[in-house]
Image (cartoon, rainbow, N blue to C red):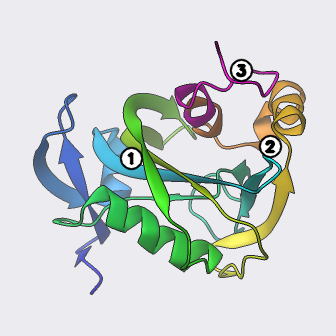
Amino acid sequence: MIHRGEHGEMVVLVDRLDRPIGVAPKLAVHRDGHLHRAVSVLLFDDVGRVLLQRRAAAKYHSALLWSNTCCGHPRPHEPPREAAQRRLREEMGISSCRLEFAGWFAYRAEVTETLVEHEVDHVYVGRWSGTPRPDPREVAAWQWRTLDDLAHGLAHSPADHTAWLPKVLAHLGLTTSGARRR
């Protein structure tokens, strides 16, 4: 069941401690910069590469930018873990991956002159090897990348990546060299 309001999908508004305080239309929340709940997923293969997606051209923001494996928003009354699994299935066509919760963090990023990502982002990681079957309405391309290659891309071409990708990597303790912080 899709939860849609007058202006599209509904998202969960939260306070800085991730306590729900209401719901609002996704587009309005991104336009007005209200703090809301999100999920981000990063999948790693057996040799430590990360699965990235290039967002579809039809996305209303951050179109054609490289990002984490998948992301999205929990629906009202949907636990974040279920939302992460749902988005992994909807975006990348992956339904057989166990996800581990890696904590949450809050951030704010201006993604356009009129759209803001102001989120409490619940981060999930998993180990998976295979060939995803992404929905072309969601994903334009995908690739497995080493953390060093990703760090190089973020350092030299940050405009090719979503605003939240470096924040998710930092939350996971990944440095610009791709190695975990000690």
Q: For the residues carrying marks 3 and 1, which lies nearer the camera in this image?
A: 3
Instruction: Say which residue appears at 60% left-offset and 65% top-offset.
Output: 59
Q: Which residue is mark 3?
A: 175
Q: Amino acid at mark 2?
A: Asp
Mark closest to the chain's N terminus, 1 or 2: 1
Q: Which residue is mark 2?
A: 160
Q: Residues within 10 Å of mark 3 (few under 14, many from 20)?
A: some
Q: Looking at the figure, which quarter contains the C terminus?
A: top right
* Residue 173 magenta: yes
Badge 2 or badge 3: first in the primary sequence: 2
* Residue type of the residue flagged with mark 3: Thr
Is 15 rendered above or below residue 29?
above
| Residue identifier under label 1 | 31
State the separation of the CA atoms marked 2 and 3. Answer: 19 Å
- Image quadrant in which you'd find residue 74: bottom left
Determine crowd level at label 1: few under 14, some 14-19, many 20+ residues with C-alpha closer than 10 A.
some
Q: Earlier in the sequence, mark 3 or mark 1?
A: 1
The residue positioned farthest toward the front in the image shown: 46
Q: Quadrant of the N terminus?
A: bottom left
Q: Position of residue 141 (x, y in %)?
A: 80, 68
Amino acid carrying label 1: it is: Arg
Give the magenta range.
Answer: 168-182
For image coordinates 56% across by 31% down, the residue present is 172
